[in-house]
Image (cartoon, helix red, strand yellow):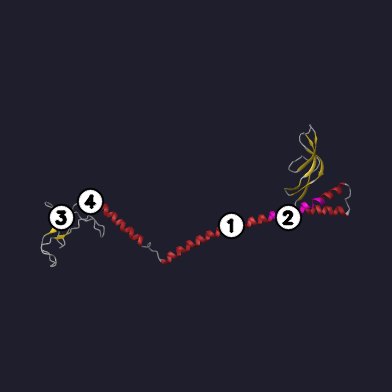
């Protein structure tokens, strides 16, 4: 800041009040970010300030630029470009293209949602079908289990000769057993089979130290199963080691 003692042009300024003038000595131009030369700044009237003693104006304008000032100018320029890029849309972008891009993203989102819904539908359908099949097998199992008493009477009649081959009762019992077998009902348990505690219920046991394993020696009631499900274990007598 320099003090100018000359008489002011403004008549309203009190007489004798010092007049001040300001000189901008910033290294970087705040308007465009360019590096100012380190020589004398131009005066307000357009004339250049006097160069330092022993240095001509040409030497002052040709003086090397301070690296710090150059870096500051570079950062200033980059900051201005960043602000300009943030305030502008991408080159070539239009409202229609932006809307198209938005709709494409929505289509992709809905497509992914549709795939998830389809997968959930398939899983739900499988669970419903599995539950229906389980319920069906349970219902068939209950019907077959209720007929086991009838089959016991048929087997006892066959053992006692009441159902002889060639008679009408023999044909009826065969058809009944064939129909029930079509629903997965099978009879098991016979003399000489290996005893299996998961299939057989031992009512009595005869010790035989020479036997390697327990076998069925007597069938009190045959067992029945539907496929792999045991409806009733076979009630048997066994013979084998103690």
Q: Nearer the viewer, mark 4 or mark 2?
A: 2
Q: Which of marks 1 and 2 is in front?
A: 2
State how far apart marks 3 and 2 are (Cα).
111 Å
Q: Nearer the viewer, mark 1 or mark 4?
A: 1
- Residue drawn at point x = 45 percent, y = 63 percent: 102
Q: Residue 173's spot in the image, x, y percent?
A: 84, 53
- Give the residues drawn in magenta, as a range: 133-150
Indicate left or right for 36 with 88 as reference.
left
State how far apart marks 4 and 3 are (Cα).
17 Å
Q: Name the residue under label 3.
A: 58
Residue 120 got which mark? Answer: 1
Q: Name the residue under label 4.
A: 66
State how far apart marks 1 and 4 are (Cα).
69 Å
Identify the mark nearer the N-term, 4 or 3: 3
Q: Mark 2 points at which residue?
A: 139
Indicate left or right for 31 with 175 as reference.
left
Where disc 3 sits, the SS reads: helix
Identify the mark nearer the N-term, 1 or 4: 4
- Residue drawn at point x = 35 percent, y = 62 percent: 87
């Amino acid at each position: 800041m320099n003090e100018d003692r000359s008489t002011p042009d403004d008549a309203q300024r009190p007489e004798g009040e010092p007049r001040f003038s300001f000189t901008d000595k910033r290294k970087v131009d705040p308007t465009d970010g360019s590096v100012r030369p380190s020589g004398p700044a131009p005066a307000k009237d357009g004339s250049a300030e006097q160069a330092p003693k022993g240095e001509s104006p040409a030497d002052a304008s040709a003086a090397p630029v301070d690296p710090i000032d150059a870096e500051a100018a570079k950062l200033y320029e980059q900051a201005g470009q960043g602000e300009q890029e943030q305030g502008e849309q991408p080159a070539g972008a239009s409202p229609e293209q932006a809307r198209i891009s938005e709709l494409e993203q929505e289509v992709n989102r809905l497509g992914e949602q549709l795939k998830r819904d389809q997968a959930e539908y398939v899983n739900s359908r499988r669970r419903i079908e599995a539950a229906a099949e389980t319920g069906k097998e349970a219902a068939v199992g209950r019907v077959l289990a209720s007929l086991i008493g009838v089959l016991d009477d048929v087997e006892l009649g066959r053992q006692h000769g009441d159902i002889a081959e060639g008679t009408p009762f023999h044909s009826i019992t065969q058809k009944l057993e064939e129909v029930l077998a079509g629903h997965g009902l099978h009879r098991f348990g016979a003399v000489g089979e290996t005893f299996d505690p998961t299939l057989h219920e031992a009512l009595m046991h005869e010790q035989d130290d020479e036997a390697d394993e327990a076998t069925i020696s007597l069938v009190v009631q045959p067992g029945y199963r539907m496929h792999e499900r045991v409806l009733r274990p076979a009630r048997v007598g066994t013979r084998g080691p103690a």
